[in-house]
Image: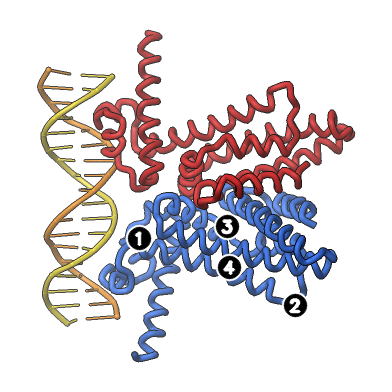
Chain colours: A blue, B red, C orange, D yellow
Amino acid sequence: MPKLSQARQELRRQQILQAAMRCFVRNGMGRTSVADITAESGLSAGSIYTHFASKAEIVQATAQDLLERRLTALAGFVGEARLPSPAQLLRHLADGISRDEARVGLQAWGEATTDPVMCGNVVATTDGMRDAIAAHCEVWLVAVKGHEASVARSRAAGLAAQLMAVYQGLIVRKALFGTTDAADETFIADAADRFA
Amino acid sequence: MPKLSQARQELRRQQILQAAMRCFVRNGMGRTSVADITAESGLSAGSIYTHFASKAEIVQATAQDLLERRLTALAGFVGEARLPSPAQLLRHLADGISRDEARVGLQAWGEATTDPVMCGNVVATTDGMRDAIAAHCEVWLVAVKGHEASVARSRAAGLAAQLMAVYQGLIVRKALFGTTDAADETFIADAADRFA
DNA sequence: GTCTATACTACGATAGAC
DNA sequence: GTCTATCGTAGTATAGAC
């Protein structure tokens, strides 16, 4: 296996996925044609089909990349030594996603309702985020709030589920509502208070 | 204007929209063809196009009906004399939406990211729900919690935004995650506690 | 690996009879 | 108003040259 060739393949793959992402932001996953992606990427149809077997695969891979970026960012944040509070965690989640990402995220949810592969990816990544949040909250509840280990664990699970729900609501808000930064800040501060 | 004819038109319209709804649950808005809707409704293509100008219009109308049903149900609930708490409100919102409705709701959000008409409908209806919740919470904060009018108003606005976010998160949960009733009940009870 | 050109299909929408 | 039949197009995927 030539290593350089693999790196080049990965580069092409990213080139295609980033072009697809821009197309999805503009026209949505459904109304984006493979021709649109070829035009946006500067590649040809033939080239794209050597890297992806079908349009569905491009759609899934684009969403998967997006989901994984969010999960990785979260893992990095809770991995720091600072031991952020649940409120700070929520704030970081909110700040970490752009409007374009929120838009394509919503499209991915819509696709996931009828595409089992997409649904599996969404559920797996979302569960991953929730578990990372739960694990962090458990530590936080013990270290900062002085809870006992067993109650911290069960409280952290519920807390994580709630934080994820608010996060998901915030994604809807960011994608569809032309809210001002000030209004978003109020919203996040309010939610943070509730989980403080 | 013949009245019976209008009623008949409305019946056909509902016949088409209900068929479309079933198709969207099965295959999604994007992958449902007009032929699918004709087959499901028992009507013909020609007939459908006398009632709707395009497929996009059918998609928008189906989503609009779904959104309005949720808004009307909420208005009815807060219109009762019982003065439910925010927690009970959330519980009612959660119970009022089926998994199929949640699925198509998610598809509508995805469409709304690139279809201005759909986006307008979603935003308007969601704002309507939030306002209805805020108005109710304001009354509740004054009557049950004994808050002063001015602080109740500002607190109610924030509370309503938070409740909507959790509600939206719950829609995602209901549509994509095969959660058990018990787990959902825990989730809702936990959220309700937080807003009690 | 990448391109151009194209085969094949599926879909949205309409025409015209009844 | 409703049906059947069909037109035109758009879009996915592939074949074959380079």
**Between B112 and A159, which is closer to the camera in this rendering?**
A159
**Picture residue at 40% right of the left edge, 56% below the top:** A116
Of badges 3 and 1, nearer the viewer stands 1
- Residue type, mark 1 in image: Ala
Question: Residue at the front extreme?
Answer: A150
Q: Are marks 1 and 2 in contact (CB under 8 Å)?
A: no
Other-residue count near label 3 (Cα within 10 Å), few / some / many at <14 / 14–19 / ≥20: some
Q: Which residue is mark 4?
A: A71
- Residue type, mark 2 in image: Ala
Say what secondary structure mark 4 lies in: helix
Do we see residue B162 in this rendering?
Answer: no
Q: CA distance from mark 1 to mark 2?
A: 40 Å
Q: Are marks 3 and 2 in contact (CB under 8 Å)?
A: no
**Picture residue at 68% right of the left edge, 67% below the top:** A135
Say what secondary structure mark 1 lies in: helix
Mark 2 or mark 3, which is nearer the start of the sequence?
Answer: 2
For residue A159, above or below residue A53? above
Of badges 3 and 2, nearer the viewer stands 2
Describe residue D16's horizontal placement relative to residue B186 as left or right: left
Q: Which residue is mark 3?
A: A99
Query: Are labels 2 and 4 assigned to the same chain?
Result: yes
Q: Chain of mark 4?
A: A
Describe residue C5's horizontal placement relative to residue B5 as left or right: left
**Picture residue at 43% right of the left edge, 53% below the top:** A111
